[in-house]
Amino acid sequence: MDPADFTEILETVRSFVANDVVPREDEIEASDAIPHDVRRTAVDMGLFGYTLPEEFGGLGLNLTEDVQLAFEFGYTTPAFRSMFGTNNGIAGKVLVSAGTPEQQAHWLPKLAAGAVASFALTEAEAGSDPSGLTTRAVRDGDEYVISGAKRFITNAPLADLFVVFARTGVESHGTKGISVFLVEAGLPGVTVGPKDHKTGQAGAWTAEVFLDEVRVPLSALVGGQEGAGFGEAMKALIRGRVHIAALCVGMAQRVLDESVAYAASSKQGGRPIGEFQLVQAMLAEIQTGVYAGRAMVLQAARDYDSGTDRRIGPSAAKLFCSEMVGRAADLGVQIHGGMGYMRGVAVERCFRDARLFRIYEGTSEIQKLILGKALIKGVK
């Protein structure tokens, strides 16, 4: 994209977040939902398809551009980004990477126009290790019959399309024989459970998805090829890790701004607490994390786009930034003192919201394993 065009998009998103979303965070928290007008504006701005190809109605942004938007998305409640995150990330990118021309032509314009796709990989015994996946798709003539249950599926109650991973091979364990299907939400046998009640991230809905002998045509098999599902899932998740890291930087920046403002205005002993050196030290620690995280994310995104590194950078950025934002939120609460433990105070919400970043798109422990293995392999 032309740099001037992207700058305009970035400034528009920054303004919308600051002027329209941030002032309504308490409303989103209380209602556990994104207001309809906020959603409609996000659709009109092209946010439901900003990474999807332009020929299908998207904006065609690369990962380096994506993370710059994610810095802005992360500044407010994660629910805002969540409503269109799977379209642009783990679900939409499976279609972009592996979908047939017919699948892409049918679904990508709908996603760019505001339909919602959910990424249905995780199961009760297949979270950090997808090789434990047990959902199965059995071919029956010119159809596949899919049965299984998925857990913690983002946007499941709102989804128009489920990108479902299921076993088609003879293997019952391991990474082989996993395929991916496009399953419309309204098909017989598809049931979405009640919304999960989470610690934080109100307004970002997750739920279980049950598939009871759901029949789909052969054309629902992504790419028309069995056994490619695990590889496509990993490709989508690797890219998503850099995006999540950018969200963490955005949230940490919000914590920093809130904490600086509070330290400058709140007084103890007749002096602003920001004059106390130990408070300044906490602010300095948050600032350092934000600065380092931002640089790391931008480098990881550039390396991803150029193809020079799509393994170490994404995992390192996700590991560092998700841990960093947790420390930043904790320090933000500490700077605010008792007020930091009160509902309705931004850093308290960030404290709860930040915890999930260390879990999804690969836990911190998984990122360490990926990094360690890659580094050792690199010297053999």
Image (cartoon, helix red, strand yellow):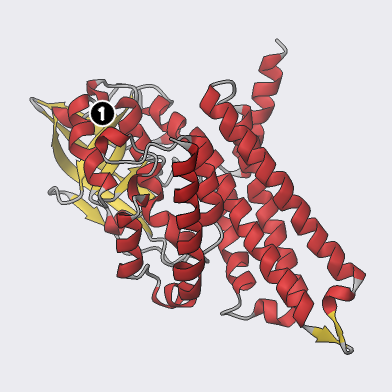
Give the quadrant of residue 98.
Answer: top left
The residue indicated by pointer 1 is 222
Looking at this view, is 364 or 315 the one in front? 315
Classify 53 as above or below 376.
below
State the residue at coordinates (64%, 34%).
299
Q: Is residue 174 above or below residue 83?
A: above
Q: Nearer the viewer, residue 352 or 291?
A: 291
Q: Is residue 128 visible?
A: no
Q: Residue furthest bottom?
A: 270
Residue that sits furthest to the front in the current view: 4
Residue 312 position, x and y percent, is: 63, 28
Among the 4 quarters of the image, the one containing residue 181: top left
Q: Residue at x 41, y 66 (%)?
A: 203
Q: Give the percent coordinates (x, y) of residue 254.
A: 63, 63
Q: Residue furthest top?
A: 380
Residue drawn at 26 percent across, 50 percent down:
210
Q: Secondary structure at mark 1?
A: helix
Q: What quarter of the picture does the N terminus occupy?
A: top left
Above or below 199: residue 74: above
Categorize mark 1 by other alpha carbons within 10 Å: few (<14), some (14-19), many (20+): many
Which corner quadrant holds the C terminus? top right
Horizontal relation, residue 318 to residue 82: left or right: right
